[in-house]
Image: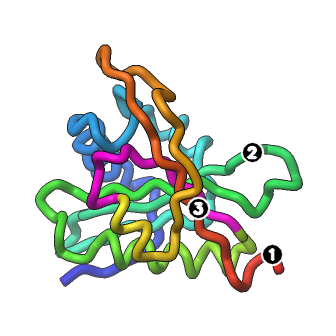
Amino acid sequence: MFTLRPMQPADWESVRDIYLEGIATQNATFEQSAPDWEKWDQGHLQACRLVAESAGEVLGWVALSAYSGRPVYRGVAWVAVYIAASARGQGIGRSLLTELIAESERQGIWTLQAGVFPENTPSVELFTRHEFRVVGTRERIGCMNGRWRDVLLLERRSAVAGV
């Protein structure tokens, strides 16, 4: 069993370790390394940062990044979801994303976006189960380790925020 709670700066080491596990798969992000806390903190919204925890151990996390600094896009954010390798398949991602969506709507965010490698089937399925839809494929958008990769662009529009 796990609980969800707001992410705290003290969680960074665990959050970073989980992020590094995702990076190591070469199927979760184009990033090749994890930033330090200050850079990560500056790049993510203060609201809508959650962790799943069991017995004091962080099992997964979600956070939002601003889509743009322009005021007209204040209600649009990018979603990041990462689950520890040892905790995958336990419904943690589903719970975190469900709560993230609810909190994002309370914060007035009307559009959530995610970029997912098409080969990352569990992530694509997670997002589509939460009413994200594929709005396009960014073909050969980045070259990672000598391999060109496509990225699916997924989007979820709120029925309540921003209307």
Tell whether 19 sits left or right of 90.
Answer: right
Q: Is residue 64 visible?
A: no
Considering only order in the chain, which callout, 2 or 1, is on the residue closer to the N terminus?
2
Percent across and percent down for residue 155 are: 58, 61
Is 49 drawn above or below residue 40 in the view shown?
below
Quarter of the rendering containing residue 61: bottom left
Q: Between residue 48 and residue 81, name the one nearer to us.
A: 81
Could you give the CA–CA distance between mark 1 and mark 2, rounded to whole angstroms? 16 Å
What label sits on residue 68 in the rendered view? Answer: 2
SS for callout 3:
strand
- Would you say 86 lies left or right of 76 here? left
Q: Amino acid at mark 3?
A: Glu
Cβ–Cβ below 8 Å for labels 2 and 3? no
- Amino acid type, residue under disc 1 in the picture: Gly
Q: Please give the residue where the numbered disc 1 appears in the rendered image.
A: 162
x and y percent of residue 44 in the render? 58, 49
Checking the image for residue 155, the label placed there is 3
- Give the CA distance from mark 2 to mark 3: 15 Å
Q: Is residue 81 above or below residue 28?
A: below
Check if residue 8 falls in the magenta segment: no
Q: Quadrant of residue 126?
A: bottom left
Q: Nearer the viewer, mark 2 or mark 3?
A: 3
CB-based contact (under 8 Å), mark 1 and mark 3: no
The picture quadrant where one finds residue 81 is bottom left
What residue sits 26% from the left and 34% below the top? Answer: 26
Magenta residues (range):
111-123
Residue at 47% x, 70% y: name it. Answer: 6
Mark 2, Cα crowd under 10 Å, few <14 / some 14-19 / many 20+, is: few
